[in-house]
Each structure stands twice: as C-alpha cells, then as structure tokens.
C-alpha cells in the first residue's frame, strides 16, 4: 500500500525566513497531494493541494511543488509569521474500487520565532 | 456554517467500559472517515464509509466499530476500550469517495483509557 514519509519532524525558523517541508510517497498511482495545517486544539485544515498533472501551485505565501518522477512533493512557506506555527501534514491520495484514500505523513511541527 | 462536529471533546474512561464518540456533518457529504493521531505516526485511518450503510476497515480497525445509518452521522464505537486506544481521534468528511476533494475535519476527541 501507499506509504508517505515526511521530513523534518520539527522545524524552527526565524520570523520572515522561509520554511520547507518535504514528503515522499511510494505508490506511483497516487494522483492528489494535499497539505493540512493543524493549529493547537483544532482539527487539520486544508491549506493547499496539487494534482498529478501540475508541477507547482502557489497561493500567496505558500507553494507546493511536485516531482512525479522522484515521487516527492514539498511545501514552501515564505516570509513566515508567528501564526504559521502549527503542525503540518502532507498526504497522498490513491484511487481504488473503495474510493480515494488519503495516506498521511507523520507531521512536521513548525515553530516561527519572533 | 459548514462543519464536522464531534462529541465529546475530552473523555477519560476505564478499561472495558463501552463508549461511543459521535460525529455529524452538515454538508451532505458522502464520504466519512475516522482517524487516530499519535505522536510520530501522523493520522491513521480507522474506518471509512462511502455512503449510508456502506462501511469498511481502514488501516487500524482493531478494537473499533462504526455505523452509518444516516448520511450525516458516523459514530465510532469502542466496545471494550484498552489503554492502547488512548489517542486523539478525528472524524472527517468529504464530498464524494470517487473524487479527490477536500476533507473537512472535526475538532478532535482526546480519549484516555486507564
């Protein structure tokens, strides 16, 4: 089955710097790659996603890149702010007769120091 | 407001005492899932449901049951809880099992089994 590895597990950056979180997946049939942000005491919330027919997608300060050949995708946050501090999860979705299943990475704790 | 509502938010129980965690969504979503979140392991799927009366096991189903009698509700049942089921639980819903669409998560239920 699908396996998603996420690195690093923790990341500390200075406010204003960039942060990069990387994920690799194992199943080449995966075709959808969302990123979720989980703030303290809340459930994960989708912040950006990318589909397998696209190499890069941007939304203001966040961007995601996908390399299908290498089976990895990354989240880039520029000009980090204290409110970016949270746990970030990557995920890969694979379709089967049972529907689209999301497999999540282990998560990255991002701390933005002001 | 579109949302997924879980109850209770916090629960401490004793080994062997049956409990139910409720989940309700108001978005008319077909697909609903339960996940558990443990440190270093990310979000792992327990059970999922593609529609009313259609449920199936996820990656870590042992010790859990679910039901889907109505489209909006997807309760998680622990018939005989054990300490290794101490975890943070999330219910999620998405529009359809056959399309890659955003998963909406509840606020989480922190369960402690002593």
Image (cartoon, coloured by chain):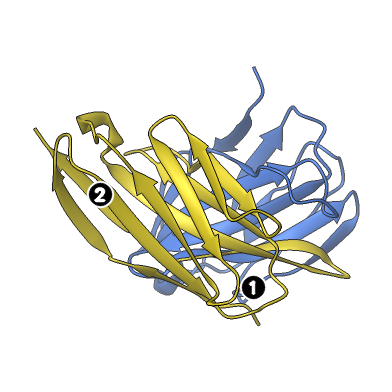
Residue occupied by mark 2 = A110
Callout 1: residue from which chain? B
Q: Residue at (25%, 49%) from the top-left corner? A: A110
When asked about the image quadrant of residue B40, the answer is bottom left
The structure residue drawn at horizontal position 21% and vertical position 56%, both measured from the top left corner, is A11
Tell me how many marks there are. Answer: 2
Where does residue B110 sit, x and y in percent of width and height? 41, 49
B27 vs A43: above or below: above
Q: Is residue B90 left or right of residue B95?
A: left
Could you tell me which residue is drawn at 35 percent across and 58 percent down? A21
Residue A98 or B64: which is nearer the viewer?
A: A98
Q: Is residue B25 above or below residue B92?
A: above
The residue positioned farthest toward the top in the image shown: B1
- Same chain, marks 1 and 2? no
Q: Quadrant of residue B87?
A: bottom left
Q: Return the mark for residue B61.
A: 1
Quick one: quadrant of the C terminus of chain B?
A: bottom left
**Residue A69 drawn at (x, y percent):** 59, 76
User: Residue at the spot x=68%, y=60% of the render?
Assistant: A52
Q: Colour of chain B?
A: blue
Left or right: A62, with A4 as reference point: left
Looking at the rendered structure, the secondary structure element under dot 2 is strand
Query: Which of the chains is yellow?
Result: A
Secondary structure of the residue carrying tag 1 is: loop
Closer to the camera, A29 or B33? A29
**Marks 1/2: CA distance?**
30 Å
Q: Left or right of A15: which side holds B82?
A: right
């Amino acid at each position: 089955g699908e396996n998603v590895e996420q690195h690093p597990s923790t990341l500390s950056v200075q406010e204003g710097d960039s942060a990069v979180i990387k994920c690799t997946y194992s199943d080449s049939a995966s075709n959808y790659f969302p990123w979720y942000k989980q703030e303290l005491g809340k459930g994960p919330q989708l912040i950006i996603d990318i589909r397998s027919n696209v190499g890069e997608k941007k939304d203001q300060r966040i961007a995601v890149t996908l390399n299908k050949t290498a089976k990895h995708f990354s989240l880039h946050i520029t000009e980090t702010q204290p409110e970016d501090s949270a746990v970030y999860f990557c995920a890969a979705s694979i379709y089967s007769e049972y529907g689209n299943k999301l497999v999540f990475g282990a998560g990255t704790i991002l701390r933005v120091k002001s | 407001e579109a949302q997924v509502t879980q109850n209770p938010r916090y629960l401490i129980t004793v080994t062997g005492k049956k409990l139910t965690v409720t989940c309700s969504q108001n978005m008319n979503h077909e697909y609903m899932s339960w996940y558990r979140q443990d440190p270093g392991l990310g979000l792992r799927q327990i059970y999922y449901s593609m529609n009313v009366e259609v449920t199936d096991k996820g990656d870590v189903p042992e010790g859990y049951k679910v039901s889907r009698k109505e489209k909006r509700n997807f309760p998680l049942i622990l018939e005989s809880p054990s300490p290794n089921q101490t975890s943070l639980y999330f219910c999620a819903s998405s529009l359809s099992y056959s399309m890659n669409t955003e998963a909406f998560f509840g606020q989480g239920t922190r369960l402690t089994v002593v």
